[in-house]
Image (cartoon, helix red, strand yellow):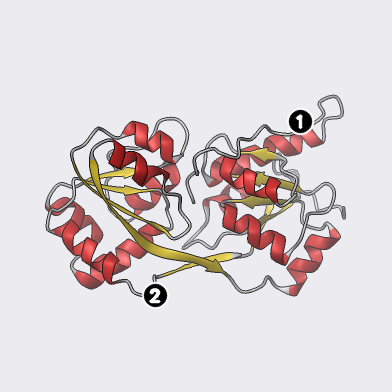
Amino acid sequence: MTPTARTGRGPLDGLRVLVPRPTAGTSPAVVALAAAGAQAVVVPLIETVLPDDPTELDDTLLALGAGWYTWLVLTSAAAVPVLVDRATEVDAPLPELVARTGTRVAAVGPGTARALREAGVPVDVVPTVGSTALRLLGALPEGPGRILFPRGDLASATLAAGLRERAWEVDDVIAYRTVPAAPPPADVVEDWRAGRIDAALLTSASTVRELAAHLGAPPAGTLLVCIGPSTAAEAHRLGLPVAAVAAEQTMLGLVGALTDAHAAAHTPSSPRESPHESPTASPEETV
């Protein structure tokens, strides 16, 4: 691997790290990587778009403002800007719809909770450990009542099924679709294949698939760090080596896992072990 410039600024000094996730504003990963001395190479591999027909989503937002739901439950930060835009389009700002009738709000993990709070929506429940659908299910009370669950088209049915088993009525509506982004720039592809990118942060199974399709397997020594077990399971399925899995399913957790993996890879007396993953684990938060 081509040596990278060292600055003496932190534990990831001089590393170039692929961040394959489009975000609005400044990405927490970019900030955390810079603080650790690394350079983020931000390359959108996926993007989110509205459903072909958003009528069902719009109808549920009108129902939200009318007090139809006991809970609004989110398992992805990517759903938040979609809900914010559509809520204003069809009725009123999302915080107003939630506050109008006291609908409670649950988020699968800290990344989703942060996105909601930044949009002005208070969050009542976030699992204290782990950012998975099963953890969120355990943090929510028993029904009866009605829950609005706006999600991505690739999200698992685990949460909706579990809520219905606990006596909740669930409006499970597609808020956005995940589609491939434009192919990465030629210089990024060249740097990846030449080993001039030292690591990649993988935030979902779809980013894993797009990385494999557009960039291919990483050169020896490039560290792939996954946000959780489902993302890691997809990497293993495609034959990609996983250096580490984040203990906390956030961008900051990913950077922390990369820091540990990088340290282990450069400590001769402490050979890196392959992380144990469960391919049947509940899907983690999408950040």
Please tell me which residue lies in front, 109 or 133: 133
Q: Which residue is mark 2?
A: 52
> Which label lies toward us, 1 or 2?
2
Disc 2: CA contacts within 10 A as few (<14), some (14-19) or many (>=20): few
State the image coordinates of residue 18 (x, y, percent, origin top left): 68, 56
Q: Horizontal placement of 200 versus 89: left or right?
A: right
Disc 1: CA contacts within 10 A as few (<14), some (14-19) or many (>=20): few
Q: Tell me, yes or no, whether the two marked residues, 1 and 2, touch with CB atoms within 8 Å.
A: no
Can see residue 228? no
User: Does residue 282 lie above or below 96 as drawn?
Assistant: above
State the image coordinates of residue 130 (x, y, percent, origin top left): 47, 34
Q: Horizontal placement of 36 versus 141: left or right?
A: right
Q: Which residue is mark 1?
A: 273
Please tell me which residue lies in front, 137 or 211: 137
**Residue visible at 31% across and 43% down?**
106
Q: Mark 1 or 2 closer to N-term?
A: 2
Amino acid under disc 2: Asp
Task: Name which quarter of the figure residue 127 lies in.
Answer: top left
Can see residue 25? yes
Task: Name which quarter of the figure residue 207 lies in.
Answer: bottom right
Report the label total: 2
Amino acid under disc 1: Glu
Q: Horizontal placement of 218 versus 36: left or right?
A: right
**Residue visible at 82% across and 62% down?**
193
**Element at badge 1?**
loop
State the image coordinates of residue 250 (x, y, percent, origin top left): 51, 44
User: Does residue 77 lie above or below 86 as drawn?
Assistant: above
**Element at badge 2?**
loop
Task: Name which quarter of the figure residue 261 lies in.
Answer: top right
Please tell me which residue lies in front, 33 or 149: 149
**Residue visible at 72% across and 40% down?**
243
Give the CA distance from mark 1 to mark 2.
Answer: 45 Å
